[in-house]
Image: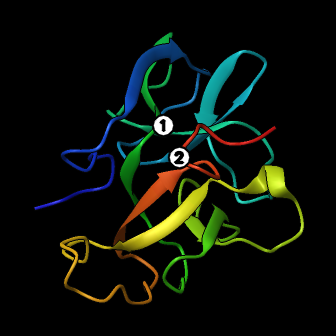
Amino acid sequence: MVVAGDIQPGHPYLQVEENKSAAAWARGDVLYTASNAWLKAPTTATTSPFGVAALAQLSGDAKGAVISSGVVAVTAGATIAANVYVQTDTTTAGRVMTWAGTLMNAIVGRYIGKVGQQDGNTVQTSASAGDVIWIRLGLQGGAGVS
């Protein structure tokens, strides 16, 4: 069973222990950077390099495992059409929603399908709020844009 924070097998990815803020985060939360530290993306539009929490981290932990490139599972915060860019969700912190289309540096990645839709035969469909989905981080699989 795939859960948020998993990486898609067979795809290259980068996971590094990074500085983190004092706040806790859950595995699979979308993260952004501020003041040389990673923290859980809030419910306000965020423009920053983005990553995904590879492991849950407690408040007070100085470092955290961050996936900053590759295909990774996250949780949808709203309905998302297949093959569109996503940004941080404005309702639930740490989730993603369809990109508003205004700021390129707000793009977390591209929604490429729900779990089980990456076999080359299954048509990718829209995601609903709460679905675990695959995204490719960044515009072309990189670690966000700034």
Give the residue type that dot 1 points to.
Answer: Ser
Give me the disc on residue 141.
2
Whether residue 6 sits left or right of residue 43 in the image: it is left
- Name the residue nearer the viewer: 142 or 1: 142
Give the residue type that dot 2 points to.
Answer: Gly
Q: Is residue 77 above or below residue 103?
A: below
Q: Position of residue 95 (x, y in %)?
A: 53, 61
At 55% from the left edge and 63% from the top edge, which residue is drawn? 110
- For the question of whether residue 61 can be seen, the reply is no
Q: Are marks 2 and 1 in contact (CB under 8 Å)?
A: yes
Secondary structure beneath disc 1? strand
Image quarter for residue 66? Answer: top left
- For the question of whether residue 89 can be seen, the reply is yes
- Name the residue nearer the viewer: 9 or 64: 9
Image quarter for residue 26? Answer: top left
The residue lying furthest to the left in this view is 1
Q: Residues within 10 Å of mark 1 (few under 14, many from 20)?
A: many
Say which quadrant the C terminus sits in.
top right
Q: Is residue 32 above or below residue 65?
A: below
Q: Position of residue 25 (x, y in %)?
A: 46, 38
Whether residue 22 sits left or right of residue 2 in the image: it is right
Q: Is residue 52 above or below residue 139?
A: above
Q: Residues within 10 Å of mark 2 (few under 14, many from 20)?
A: some
At 18% from the left edge and 72% from the top edge, which residue is drawn? 119
Give me the disc on residue 69.
1
Give me the disc on residue 135.
none
